[in-house]
Image (tube, rainbow, N blue to C red):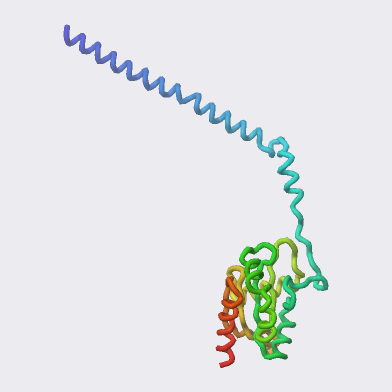
Amino acid sequence: MKKVFCYLLVLGLISCGGQNVKVEEASATPEVTKTKATANQVKTNHPAAGVKAPTGIKNQAQKRPTPTQKTLAEYEPKNEGWHVNLEDAIAESKKTGKPILANFTGSDWCGWCKRLDKSVFHQAGFKPWADKNVVLLELDFPKRFRVPQEIAMQNRNLAQSFQVRGYPTIWLFDAGVDDAGKHKFSALGKTGYTKTLEEFQSTIGKYIAARTS
């Protein structure tokens, strides 16, 4: 009798276990269905499915100005007294015997370039120092306007030649033309952002002194 009772008890436990498995499987079904419904809902609400994008986003895209293209005649350096054409800088360097100080900059978007303008190039003592020691060349990579095609190509080539990786980068160099009519450069030294005019003059001054020694 005991054996029969135990046998029935075991069958009852196995039967309960089977019911639990079935319940777990059944409970998973609504979650899958819900996930599919959510995916379909997202797909239906996507603008590509025919629902119009919010007006504000569309208007913002339309308001983005297209960079204006400047001609060679109207293009001028951001800072007064700087050349934008390498040939002009080379001609002055050859005439005066002074090295070229090239400023690789993003004038209308680079924060550190703007700080350098303020801390060094716009200081009262910079122009007298520059007139005496260097030929200034501005090589700009703006985003809100496009420099003339000839200047853009020149600036890219010089950036590659001097391996410029960021802005601002200031290179001091001598430049000339070889017998084949190609430019040749002799790099003297470089710097980046400097906090004061005195620090800038000290760094570039060492390169100039080494050039003439």
Quadrant of the frame with the C terminus: bottom right
Residue 55 in the image, given as x and y percentages of width and height: 74, 40
Residue 127 in the image, given as x and y percentages of width and height: 69, 80
Residue occupying the point 66% across, 84% down: 134
User: Image quadrant of residue 135?
Assistant: bottom right
Decide which of 15, 88 is in the foreground and name it.
88
Left or right: residue 195 compared with residue 74: left
User: Image quadrant of residue 165?
Assistant: bottom right
Residue 182 in the image, given as x and y percentages of width and height: 68, 84
Residue occupying the point 76% across, 50% down: 63
Above or below for 196 versus 13: below
Residue 179 in the image, given as x and y percentages of width and height: 68, 91
Residue occupying the point 60% across, 85% down: 186
Residue closest to the far left: 2
Residue closest to the far right: 73
Quadrant of the frame with the N terminus: top left
Residue closest to the far front: 124
Decide which of 190, 126 is in the foreground and name it.
126
